[in-house]
Amino acid sequence: MDLGYTELAAASRPDALRAALAANAEELRHAADEHHGGEMASVRRASYQGHEIEVWTTYEITVDGRPFDVHLTVDNAGRVHYHGLPTRDFPSVIGLVKKAIDVFGDEFSSDSPVQPDERGPDPHHHDHGGGA
Amino acid sequence: MASIRRNIVTDQAARDAFVSGVLALKAEFLGTTTADIGIAGPARQVSTYDLFTVWHHLAMGQMTPPGQADRNAAHSGPVFLPWHRLMLLLLELQLQRVLGDDEVGLPYWDWAADGALPSAAQPQAPIWQPDGIGGTGTPVADGPFGADRFQVRIDSDRFGRLRATDRGLRRTLAAGVRTLPTPQQVSAALRRPAYDLSPWDRGVAGFRNHLEGWRPAPPGLHNRVHVWIGGDMGPATSPNDPVFYLNHCNVDRIWEAWMVDRGRSYQPPQSASDQLRFHRTDDPMYSILITQPITPGQVLDIGTFYSYDQLT
């Protein structure tokens, strides 16, 4: 089906925009939730000579002793990604955290309030081989 | 009415219309509040402009499929280019509405032209002057989006959660990486024969992944522009900075050039796995701002809506 200018222009009027927002109200109510990729662990998978390889990686990170409990993922090349900075990847987690401090500096200051999600280290989180 | 998208650096009228339209959309409130989008604290009105920022943020959190953190409903997969084409088209229609001119087109910023300049000259290029879109700063102090005229009302914290704020725009030009992408890097992307490749993620060597910037040397092209500008262009709320649209309009122009050369083809087909929901050619793209389902296949030929004054 071809897109029509008249139809899309009509869909951009305020009443149509309000209707679209109302139709997606439940989705919008969760817009402020933390971005998660599902499990907190990062899983790398590869096939090699008929074998299926899985590498599970989790991290425990603190900054000034306070947990920096975010979901990091590692790709098959070993580079690390973080949803807070979605257009970059990093060769090391240390470099990633440094950049997060650069961008979100106010939140890392000593007088910033403790966030509800600043959980203490989870004894079930272990680094199973973090390649980056 | 089809518009013509023009170079913001060389077309003052296109620049002025863009600035006027953005400021009008920032000042328009249709009733949605921060409480409606789950932000704690006193409810505040959310502008039409900021609804686009919320949409982008939401799309980035919509993992495809759930349970992995690579491909989402707008990035790191095939739909990256069609989804942003749709987003820009809907913003362009909003600009036309608030300006009362159905021939207004989004301008593009040909960042590779600035990438051909010496690195020290790049942050001083015309676009960053007060009669362009203003320069660097935390907050930006000059130009049409300086702190005296333009406020960021919603951003995201280090956990990726939306929150209310009230501050000026932030840019840290050339701090994240020293240089913009070059014309040679754009040419190399245009030579990629395949639009995208299985497994449709950040690791493949197709055209989409080169233009998005995950290959061959990240951050490249689109991603590199985000990183080079820095500040509010870093997080998932990057549409907070109007330069987001100038960057993506140029990305869309490069995609259009690729299609003119290679044909209006798209991958993956609808027969691909359900794990690729939102990315297959006939999947409705993720949206909160329009009820009409629009698919990647429907936006490959967009001549009804706009064209570019010049392709690369």
Image: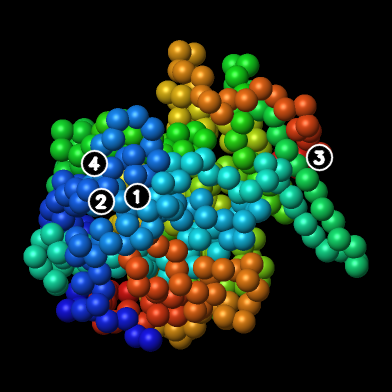
Say the numbered circle drawn on residue A129: 3
Secondary structure found at label 4: strand
What residue is pinned by disc 1? Answer: B53
Query: Observer-nearest residue: B20 or A19?
Result: A19
On the same chain: label 4 and label 1? yes
Image coords of residue B200 (percent x, y): 61, 67
Residue lying furthest right in this view?
A50
Q: Chain of mark 4?
A: B
Q: Quadrant of the C terminus of chain B?
A: bottom left
Image coords of residue B142 (percent x, y): 18, 36
Q: CA distance from mark 3 to mark 1?
A: 37 Å
Residue drawn 85% across the image and 56% down it:
A53
What residue is pinned by disc 4? Answer: B45
Badge 1, how many Cα within 10 Å: few under 14, some, many 20+?
A: some
Question: In which quadrant of the rendered view does residue B297 lie?
Answer: bottom left
Residue drawn 38% across the image and 32% down it:
B40
Q: Are marks 2 and 1 in contact (CB under 8 Å)?
A: yes
Q: Is residue B207 left or right of residue B1?
A: right
What residue is pinned by disc 2? Answer: B49
Nearer the camera: disc 2 or disc 4: 4
**Against B168, is B79 above or below?**
below
Q: CA distance from mark 2 to mark 4?
A: 12 Å
Asked whether residue A82 is in view, the answer is yes
Q: CA distance from mark 3 to mark 2?
A: 44 Å
Q: Chain of mark 1?
A: B
- The amino acid marked with disc number 4 is Gln
Q: CA distance from mark 2 to mark 1?
A: 7 Å
